[in-house]
Amino acid sequence: MTNMQNREKHAQTYPSARKIRRSCNRELYRTIKKLKIWIPPAQLIEAENLYFRKVVLNLPWIVENGSNRKALADWWAENVGPEIAALWNVEPSELERAFREAFGG
């Protein structure tokens, strides 16, 4: 294998916006299931948009740490969780616990 082929093989590609949005949606859905509460659709959409924006702004770091669930869950707890907790009127610690259970970090 030539050096160029090796470099291409190990190059990390960024996911599409659609894939990011669907992942954010899925992770929040699973978190809500763990919380066992009802979230109004408008608040859910607002949380998804917030989460999507934060992921896109930190995409290089997230792709680099894609296989480290604990680091990703820590990032979420620091950067996304408090804002979503305020939006959904839940305790940040309870939301973080539910996210970690759902996400696996």
Image (spheres, rainbow, N blue to C red):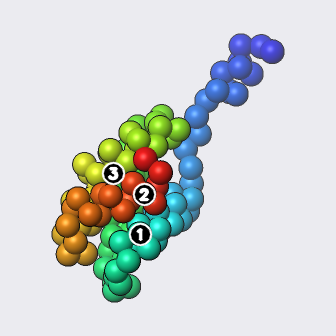
Left or right: where 52 falls relative to 79: right
Q: Is residue 3 above or below residue 43?
A: above
Residue contact at pointers 2 and 1, CB within 8 angstroms: yes
Return the x and y of residue 17 as percentages of the image width and height.
Answer: 52, 58
Q: Is residue 17 visible?
A: no
Q: Which residue in the protein does label 3 denote? A: 76
Residue 101 tag number: 2
Return the x and y of residue 52 as percentages of the image width and height.
Answer: 40, 60
Q: Amino acid at mark 1?
A: Lys
At numbered mark 2, what does the secondary structure look like: helix, strand or loop? helix
Q: Sequence order check: which comes first, mark 3 or mark 2?
A: 3
The quarter of the picture where the N terminus appears is top right
Q: How many marks?
A: 3
Q: Residue at x 38, y 59 (%)?
A: 99
Q: Residue at x 25, y 48 (%)?
A: 78
Q: Residue at x 57, y 59 (%)?
A: 19
Q: Amino acid at mark 2?
A: Glu
Q: Is residue 99 above or below residue 15?
A: below
Q: Residue at x 42, y 57 (%)?
A: 101
Q: Is residue 97 above or below residue 105?
A: below
Residue 59 tag number: none
Return the x and y of residue 47 as percentages of the image width and height.
Answer: 33, 70
Q: Amino acid at mark 3?
A: Trp
**How far apart, in angstroms, are the residues tagged by discs 2 and 1?**
7 Å
Q: Is residue 19 visible?
A: yes
Mark 3 or 2, which is nearer the eye?
2
Q: Could you classify mark 1 by the number of other residues whose Cα lies within 10 Å: few (under 14), some (14-19), or many (20 or more)?
A: some
Residue contact at pointers 3 and 1, CB within 8 angstroms: no
Instruction: Please tell me which residue lies in front, 49 or 43.
Output: 43
Q: Which residue in the protein does label 1 denote? A: 34
Q: Sequence order check: which comes first, mark 3 or mark 1?
A: 1
